[in-house]
């Protein structure tokens, strides 16, 4: 039961036994973390437990709830921490300030709305609202976005937001992450200025404003700085390794008076630079607070000693880090296994077969996860799992063939195979500028009245369209002209490549804020299609296998039991009994873009560390020794640098029997 505590009513503590509830490392943080403190909480070391007990300890010592600020990163984490504090106290500290950075920023700004030029009831734009407002700005500025592929408002919002949160100029952001839009710099800058003006004139803020204006308030309005820095006697920040520069500066301002700031994080798990997170915030803590203390939580409650030995070995190769050494509380278990397969299909076959064996041994599918660096690395595995009726979900996303960009490309192929597929017509046409669902429907009707596929690329097709839509139709014709060829029907990989090269890659760049990842997916689709002898069979296989919903496994009802597939980024903070890490090839993991950038390579290594420490018991590291690349043919895939670096005493090599790639290809083409 929860209790609401009235104002000025003292909390009744349930005699918390801190010494027995905490290990010595945690106990020291909870009872002695005065002044500036950095808590290096290694994977599985109980950082959340330490934070909630620290809050309880402060309250027990008489610190009023309103004088404590607890900052988290997600609403889910904030709710979880609040619930656990209430369970521990058997009461609700009603005036405790807790929540995400944006939540606390919103609350603070409303108290000083007048000082920042806003009304107290200012509105907050969500992502959809921001995109809609950017569309208005583009229209008001009369920007011609159809002359060439101008970035979609969603992409513009991502670019502007990233530049703010990473403390980079707009030009720097474009140069490094979106060089194909650099020639639009001046136009994008004007859009940003108009966007900011319209937000202010309508008394609205977006999520970034909640940080920007909060920091401005603390730096420029003395009474605001005085109020908050004096009110918050103790500040606790979770996941400090994920803060961006704005957030770290806000914490610095808030802690200026009492200087009781406790930040908890793990530099070895800083993996979100693509969102603006800056690992230097946690690494530079000793320089920012020379009188600060550093605590280490190194006792791991999750994994076996064998798993931690491998993880410690790997992360030791990073130069920019705090020295830590995970120690296992759990008893010894099996050694991590390194498996080398002939190719991607051998990899998929091994993973699927081993999962079935584990299930026969009594392991539930929910206790198993397959992790990968990028989504495209799961394509062959998804097909193999479906073929074997092994239920799975893709965490934080959708299955490979259900993604928008994959379905866009396949829609063009479906039209070339079945010209009367109205759904594919509508999808393929609607991505073109100036062609909405109405015009797409009229174009399909015009075609279906004649039934001649060649009319699609003809001059007399679609003459009723206005000029803007004519440009979109021209793009569509260009793609279709490249693939309406009877010879290409036997080369599905060539068909997909032509669709990408004849306009879809440009579309993806302009419309997706993670365009580079989507292009990687499309390239892998080309590689995957290489093993099929016809586009018809490729489509048949995808359609039949993607319709599988995972109802049974080997004839046994699965109910809600399912295997988890996940990118490593989506898996952070989670744990499973058994983990497979696939695609451990040089150039894929670590990603090829990190090769020449030492700091990016270190983040890739942290990503591997995060993946390895998700498992409690068994870890399988899978390396395909060859792969097909449509530009180079069959290539030898070197083992990932992260495997090469490992001391061989930290893993066992497994020898396996597997189907050859040729055998797999023959199987795919069976009628």
Image (cartoon, rainbow, N blue to C red):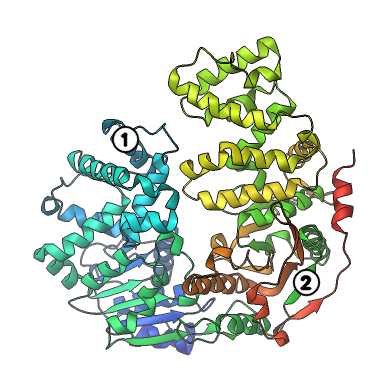
Q: Is residue 195 above or below residue 52?
A: above
Quick check: 620 left or right of 658? left
Which residue lies under the disc numbered 1?
138
Relative to the observer, which residue lies in front, 22 or 298? Answer: 298
C-alpha span from label 1 to label 2: 53 Å
Report x, y in % for residue 6: 25, 62
The answer to whether residue 598 is seen in the rendering is yes
Residue at figure coordinates x 62%, y 50% from the top left: 521
Residue at figure coordinates x 61%, y 47% from the top left: 398
Furthest toward the top, the residue is 449
Which residue lies under the disc numbered 2?
339
Q: Is residue 583 above or below residue 194?
A: below
Relative to the observer, which residue lies in front, 656 or 110? Answer: 656
The mark nearer the N terminus, 1 or 2, is 1
Residue 584 sits in quarter? bottom right
Residue at figure coordinates x 45%, y 81% from the top left: 320
Quick check: 656 left or right of 559? right
Relative to the observer, which residue lies in front, 632 or 289? Answer: 632
Report x, y in % for residue 381: 74, 55
For disc 2, the neighbor class at 10 Å (few under 14, some 14 to 19, many from 20) is some
Q: Callout 2: helix, strand or loop?
A: strand
**Image quarter in which the C terminus is found:** top right
**Image quarter in which the N terminus is found:** bottom left
Quick check: 281 left or right of 252? right
Report x, y in % for residue 334: 75, 80
Tell me whether circle 1 and circle 2 mark residues in contact (CB < 8 Å).
no
Relative to the observer, which residue lies in front, 427 or 95? Answer: 427
Q: Is residue 147 above or below residue 257?
A: above
Q: Callout 1: helix, strand or loop?
A: helix
The answer to whether residue 399 is seen in the rendering is no
């Amino acid at each position: 039961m929860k209790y609401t505590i009235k104002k000025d009513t003292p909390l009744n503590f349930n005699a918390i036994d801190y010494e027995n509830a905490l290990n010595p490392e945690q106990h020291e943080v909870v009872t002695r973390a005065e002044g500036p403190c950095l808590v290096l909480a290694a994977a599985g070391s109980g950082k959340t437990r330490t934070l909630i007990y620290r809050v309880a300890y402060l309250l027990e010592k008489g610190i009023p709830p309103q004088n404590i600020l607890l900052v988290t990163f997600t609403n889910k984490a904030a709710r979880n921490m609040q619930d656990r504090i209430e369970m521990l106290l058997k009461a609700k500290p009603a005036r405790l300030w807790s929540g995400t950075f944006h939540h606390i920023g919103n609350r603070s700004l409303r108290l000083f709305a007048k000082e920042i030029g806003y009304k107290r009831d200012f509105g907050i734009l969500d992502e959809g609202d921001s995109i809609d407002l950017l569309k208005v700005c583009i229209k008001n500025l009369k920007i011609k976005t159809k002359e060439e592929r101008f970035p979609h408002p969603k992409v513009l919002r991502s670019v502007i937001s990233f530049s703010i949160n990473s403390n980079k100029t707009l030009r720097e952001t474009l140069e490094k992450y979106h060089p194909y839009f650099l020639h639009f710099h001046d136009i994008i800058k004007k859009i940003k200025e108009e966007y900011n003006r319209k937000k202010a004139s309508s008394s609205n803020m977006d999520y970034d404003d909640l940080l920007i204006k909060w920091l401005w308030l603390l730096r420029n309005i003395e009474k605001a700085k005085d109020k908050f820095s004096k009110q918050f006697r103790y500040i606790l920040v979770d996941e400090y390794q994920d803060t961006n520069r704005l957030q770290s500066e806000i914490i610095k301002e808030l802690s200026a008076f009492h200087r009781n700031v406790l930040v908890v994080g793990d530099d070895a798990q800083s993996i979100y630079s693509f969102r603006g997170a800056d690992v230097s915030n946690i690494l530079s803590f000793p320089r920012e607070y020379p009188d600060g203390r550093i605590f280490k939580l190194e006792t791991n409650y999750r994994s076996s000693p064998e798993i931690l030995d491998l993880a410690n070995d790997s992360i030791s190769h990073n130069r920019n880090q705090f020295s830590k050494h995970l120690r296992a509380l759990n008893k010894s278990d099996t050694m991590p296994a390194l498996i080398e397969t002939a190719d991607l299909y051998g990899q998929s076959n091994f993973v699927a077969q081993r999962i079935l064996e584990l299930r026969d041994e009594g392991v539930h599918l929910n206790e198993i996860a397959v992790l990968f660096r990028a989504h495209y690395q799961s394509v062959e595995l998804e097909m193999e799992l479906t073929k074997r009726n092994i239920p799975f979900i893709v965490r934080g996303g959708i299955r490979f063939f259900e993604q928008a960009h994959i379905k866009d490309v396949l829609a063009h192929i479906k039209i070339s195979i079945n010209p009367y597929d109205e759904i594919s017509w509508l999808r393929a046409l609607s991505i073109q500028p100036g062609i909405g669902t109405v015009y797409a429907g009229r174009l399909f009707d015009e075609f279906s009245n004649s039934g001649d596929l060649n009319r699609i690329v003809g001059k007399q097709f679609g003459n009723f369209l206005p000029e803007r839509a004519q440009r979109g139709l021209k793009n569509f014709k260009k793609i279709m002209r490249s693939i309406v060829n009877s010879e290409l029907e036997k080369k599905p990989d060539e068909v997909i490549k032509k669709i990408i090269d004849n306009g879809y890659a440009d579309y993806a760049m302009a419309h997706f804020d993670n365009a580079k990842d989507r292009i990687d997916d499309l390239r892998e689709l080309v590689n995957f299609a290489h093993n099929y002898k016809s586009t018809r069979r490729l489509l048949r296989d995808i359609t039949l296998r993607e319709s599988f919903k995972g109802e049974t496994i080997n004839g046994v009802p699965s109910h809600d039991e399912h295997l988890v597939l996940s990118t490593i980024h989506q898996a952070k903070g989670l744990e499973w009994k058994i983990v497979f890490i696939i695609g451990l090839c040089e150039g894929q993991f670590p990603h090829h873009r990190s090769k020449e950038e030492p700091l990016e390579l270190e983040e890739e290594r942290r990503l591997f560390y995060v993946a390895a420490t998700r498992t409690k018991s068994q870890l399988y590291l899978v390396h395909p020794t060859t792969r097909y690349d449509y530009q180079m043919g069959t290539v030898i895939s070197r083992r990932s640098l992260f495997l090469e670096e490992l001391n061989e005493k930290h893993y066992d090599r497994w020898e396996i029997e597997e189907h050859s790639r040729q055998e797999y290809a023959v199987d795919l083409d069976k009628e």
